[in-house]
Amino acid sequence: MLLPSLQFATRVLRTANKRHLWKFMWNFGVKGVRSVELFKKRLKKGEYFPPFLYLSILNSCNLRCQGCWVDVDKPQVKLSLDELDRIVNDAKAHGNSFFGILGGEPFLHPELLDFLERHPDCFFQIFTNGQLITEKTAARLAKIGNATPLISIEGTEDVSNERRGGKDVLGRTLRGLDNCLQAGLVTGVATSLCQTNIDQLLTEAWLWKLIDRGVHYAWFHTYRPVGPQIHEELALTPEQARRVRKFVVEMRVRLPIAIIDAYYDGEGRALCPMATGISHHISPTGAIEPCPIIQFATENVRDGSIYDLMTQSAFLRDFREAAAQHTRGCVVLERPDLVQEIAKKHGARDTTLRQTAMAELEAMTPRGSQWLPDGEEIPEKHWAYRLAKRVWFNDFGVYEPMEKAATSAPATTTPDA
């Protein structure tokens, strides 16, 4: 276990731009830990303000992925540079330093790099298809030094074209990936595992290809059938989903690459970042949503301080509490009826441009998510992940006892990775 960890640390030190690596370690590592500690203190006062905010800065994208819930084919809407600055400055005033940047495709936002440059005391993770990251863009990212690209790869060349609705998708993505690595950026690869790519990408051989290329971390999501075109046929079976969790835990102790997940504690018990209050989402229209796939809101960042709006929101509170009471998994997948009920109770606005979010929920078939029955959890084996999750990323005591939560889980479960 120690040898892969040492190899990973050596590889990062050897390949990453030193200024960029320092900002990663300080702004994300040290200050990120501090933001979680402040979050814990706020919890004791009953205040929920997430230490990690996710910002979808625009809806536009150059691809058309299967199952995408973002209105990429609608006229562009985006958060302006002034709005982004105000959001981040407000969060920074309460101890935050890390932000996830989503789209659409974030690199289509004309002021993305200017925005990053204006916040050298923060760190950003950019969820991107990588195709717009030229050598020049990667060099500027390295000069700014405060962002890690997380580049999505969905399969082999044929699968990538099918999954993402384009031509030469994999080739163009790999060119962007290589530009990031050659610029010395700490760089990750994300994959939404589904029926058409699990056998190719959930393998040790694939992770070694990433390592050999220079990639520093991987993030395996599982495909979530939500939105206007859910493509249920792509969803994993329960057996495949357990296989994902087992694979992630085992590869962490065997390979010199970091593997991220956001849906389990150190004992392998499922959790939802929204339910714990550790993260919420802001849409391109400024809507403050529980998470990216719950596209309803009662507050908007243009209404005032995001700290005040989030800590005082009865809508967000009800979502957190209901999710924690009824499942340790994903409330959208397991209880779409409950999502409808809370949205209607608060008169929440449909935050999509297509204005069909409620009808989509009504059409959903309840299914399992990352929740595993009591006794079937797969605990972390790597000491570093166990420690980090025990201290800084856990359920923060929001869930009911496992036995009670289990009685509310759906009869047919499809656990997530």
Image: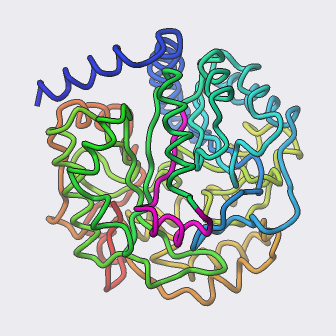
**Rendered residue at 86%/57% (across/down):** 76
The residue closer to the viewer here, 305 or 133, is 133
**Where's the C terminus, which quadrant?**
bottom left
Q: Is residue 267 magenta?
A: no
Q: In this rendering, would 227 be left or right of 388?
A: right
In the rendered image, the vertical position of residue 226 relative to residue 50, given as above or below: below
**Where's the N terminus, which quadrant?**
top left
Measured as percent of width and height from the top left, residue 282 is found at 71, 49
The residue closer to the viewer here, 396 or 329, is 329
**Rendered residue at 79%/25% (across/down):** 114
Measured as percent of width and height from the top left, residue 250 is found at 16, 48
Measured as percent of width and height from the top left, residue 367 is found at 41, 81
Measured as percent of width and height from the top left, residue 57 is found at 75, 46
In the rendered image, the vertical position of residue 252 relative to residue 192, given as above or below: above
Hey, which quadrant is residue 247 in on the image?
Answer: bottom left
**Rendered residue at 68%/26% (across/down):** 136
Range of residues picked out in magenta:
149-167
Give the colour scheme of this rendering.
rainbow
The residue closer to the viewer here, 222 or 199, is 199
Q: In this rendering, would 136 be left or right of 124?
A: right
Total labels: the figure holds 0
Q: In this rendering, would 411 be left or right of 158?
A: left
